[in-house]
Image (cartoon, grey):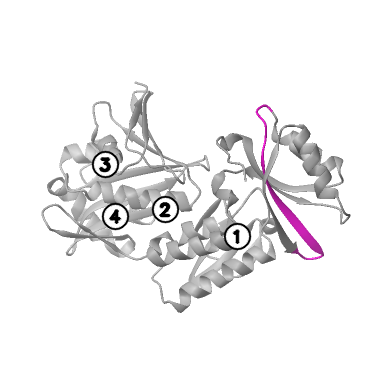
Amino acid sequence: MAETSDTSDTWRLRVELDDHPGVLARITTRLAARDCNVLALSILPVPGGVVDEIVIQAAPGVPPADLVREIRAEGGRCLGITHADVRDLVDPPTAAVRATAMALADPYAVPEAIRILLTADSVGYEQGEPGTVADGGHRAFLSLSDGVTVAARRGWAPFTDVELARAAAFTELLSRNDIDLDPPTAVVTPTGAGVVLRRGDHTDVDAVGDLHARCSARSLFARYHSGVRTLPRRLLHRLLTPPRGRTLLAVSGREVIGIGQLIRTARPEEAEVSLLVEDSWQHNGIGTALLRRLAASARAEGHSELVAWCLPGESGFERTAVRAGIPVSVRQEQGMVRLGLSVAEGESASHTVSTR
């Protein structure tokens, strides 16, 4: 099997072919004439027939539209096409085993495991009727436990019955193992203090208000970029239950000592991230732990980049990203510093690219 080194030239296609001998061979011959290589092929049963899934490494300069035309020339119909890379060469049973192992080892990674299992664009917690599909088969609802559902989305091709059955078996396995699907996680600081990371909700309003009261004016200015000292109760509620994202708290005893937010933007591949850690707890790895967990959530929800906005001269967030092992780029925009954190699957580094 040939290797692919340039993901931009590698494509995953789902096609319907005429049920005649030699059709797939003729398509392969056409692609070979364009210096394209078929890296993987799998067959997915669907009502009334089958769908072929093909991973193709295209020659440089061959656009995806040309691949679709070559398939159509042999009577095939392209149902969807998307970028692919070497991870897409793993057969579905192996992908299922890997996703299961990921979920059992780290329950917080369940949405990411489902995304991998279904080759979905995003998976996020969302209310819906389990087992149903919407948007022409491009959105599917899965039950993780009593009252907890996720929505899987895939724009490039609708989900097939086989894929949904595989995902249902996966979620049934998780429910039988009584896995907490959004569990608190523990962090031990260098001084030996224990800190719990968990999702925030409306019951944490007073504790988050107290956190802001204990923070210095400098820390609050770095977070909000204005002279905030206290937040009205309605804004505290919005901070804890944002309509387009999630809030993660760092808790020691009964006190909230840090808060991180992940907010979706107008660009599907991007989300905005922010952190606030109480002054006396800074430089203890709390911000790093918050950022790592938010980055994992962002990957599961289909984001490839996190964006943070900082004031010129503020380098705390940049250092936190580096300590978290997240590649970060820095540039100036309209008097602010824009940090771009790459959280795409498989990315792991601790370097900064500056364009200041």
Discs 3, 2 touching: Cβ within 8 Å: no
Left or right: 218, with 198 as reference point: left
> Which mark is first along the chain, 4 or 2?
4
The secondary structure that most of the magenta stretch takes on is: strand
Quarter of the image where one finds residue 322: top left
Q: Secondary structure at mark 1?
A: helix
Quarter of the image where one finds residue 350: top left
From the top left corner, tell me how far across and down residue 25 is, in percent: 81, 47
Q: Amino acid at mark 4?
A: Arg
Q: Closest to the observer: 172 or 89? A: 89
Label 3 – label 2 distance at C-alpha: 18 Å
> Which mark is first along the chain, 1 or 2?
1
- Number of residue marks: 4
> Which mark is first along the chain, 3 or 1?
1
Q: Amino acid at mark 3?
A: Arg
Label 1 – label 4 distance at C-alpha: 49 Å
From the top left corner, tell me how far across and down residue 327 is, in percent: 37, 37
Q: Closest to the observer: 240 or 287? A: 287
Residue beneath disc 4 = 233
Q: Is residue 43 magenta?
A: no
Residue beneath disc 3 = 323
Q: Is residue 276 above or below residue 137?
A: above
Residue beneath disc 2 = 297
Q: Is residue 330 above or below residue 232?
A: above
Q: Magenta stretch: give its range.
A: 46-61
Residue beneath disc 1 = 92
Q: Is residue 120 above or below residue 165?
A: above
> Which mark is first along the chain, 2 or 3?
2
Q: Amino acid at mark 2?
A: Ser
Label 2 – label 4 distance at C-alpha: 27 Å
